[in-house]
Image: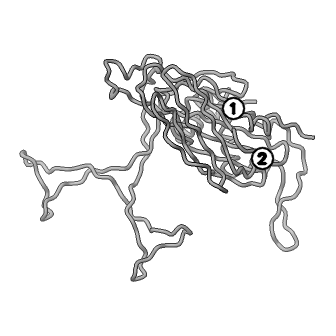
Amino acid sequence: MKHNFKKILTVCLIASLAVTAFGCSSTSENGNSETVAPQETISLDQTKQSLTFVHDVGTSEEVTEAGGDAAEGAENAEGSEASGGTATTAAGNNTEKASTTSVTVVPATEYVKVTDDKGQPVTDANGQEQTEVVTVTEFVPVTEANGQPVTDTAGQPVTEAVPVTETVVVTEPVENPATFKPNEGGNTSAYTPSYDLCKAYWLDMSQEGDFLFEGEFLIIEFEVNKDIPDGSYPITIEKADIASWEVKSYHPQIINGEVAVNTDVTAQADFPADDFALKVNSVSAKQGDTVKVAIDLKNNPGFCGFVIDVKYDKSAMTIVDSYGGENFVNTAINYVAN
């Protein structure tokens, strides 16, 4: 099957594939719309996508979309080519294609004139008006936890200033982690991180239901580069779109982790008592080590598809393998219907 994480992403965001592939809408006697049984057989190719990991896809969803539009016309190509990254299936096969584009979201700024206490423009020695860079803000209503607006003693809505953000696209040569040496000359301040994503996606609607399991979910193995400074290197889940058979989209709580190189691991939060959550387990390492970073889950409501983006510093670490965790594999990957 061709790799196509855009298709799986659609399922995880709105689960519309579940409706169109397995049922149609009708009207009951009381006027409500309901889903009826399927009328035709759907091939497994349309309802299953093996667990796949894609590396070097950039640092945000905008990169995927920018490269994905061009990939639509090349849908018969392998997913690593369509996504502009390195695709690795659960079996470990991969093809490489470098990525040099990164997208980040930063506070929006603007230049404003500097004025004195009387509101008059401030000028320099040459008589030129001085300007300064300020963060653009906007006023938004303050709401309670239940979404209701907060009001003052006069009954007027309370607002607060929040920064306006903008997306910045940067294209630059890719540093080779094998030759990048931030410790050269003992100057650790020369180290510059370079973040990228490992995208994992999977779909199995062939069982006409969800998969329930707890514990070990996904595993990514990193080789810690030999020439990086001691310190903490975050491993974070940037996005987790998870879809159920019943056309529900889940966005679990996230507990991020780190690879602590020759330093103490930062204490992590516990899983919530009742809420669906994903946790990146922190690990200790030394330069040159290969470590397994496991992503666990708890309070799983049941799902049949997902797209998960894991961000890491590719100047500090190189992905050497990625695969399903034991609990996920035993429950979903190796599942055989009776």
181 lies above or below 38: above
Q: Residue at x 59, y 21 (%)?
A: 96
Q: Mark 2 points at which residue?
A: 212
Q: Residues within 10 Å of mark 1 (few under 14, many from 20)?
A: many
Q: In which quarter of the image is residue 173?
A: top left
Q: Which amino acid does label 2 sit on?
A: Leu
Tell me residue 197's x, y (percent): 55, 34
Q: Residue furthest bottom?
A: 154
Residue nearer the viewer, 325 or 57: 325
Residue nearer the viewer, 67 or 5: 5
Mark 1 element type:
strand
Tell me residue 182's x, y (percent): 37, 23
Q: What residue type is labelled 1?
A: Thr
Q: Horizontally, is 222 left or right of 106 in the view?
A: right
Mark 2 element type:
loop
Q: Name the residue under label 1.
A: 52
**For discs 1 and 2, the disc positioned in front in the rendered view:** 2
The quadrant in which the N terminus is found is: top right
Upstream in sequence: badge 1 or badge 2:
1
Q: In which quarter of the image is residue 83?
A: top right
Q: Quadrant of residue 292?
A: top right
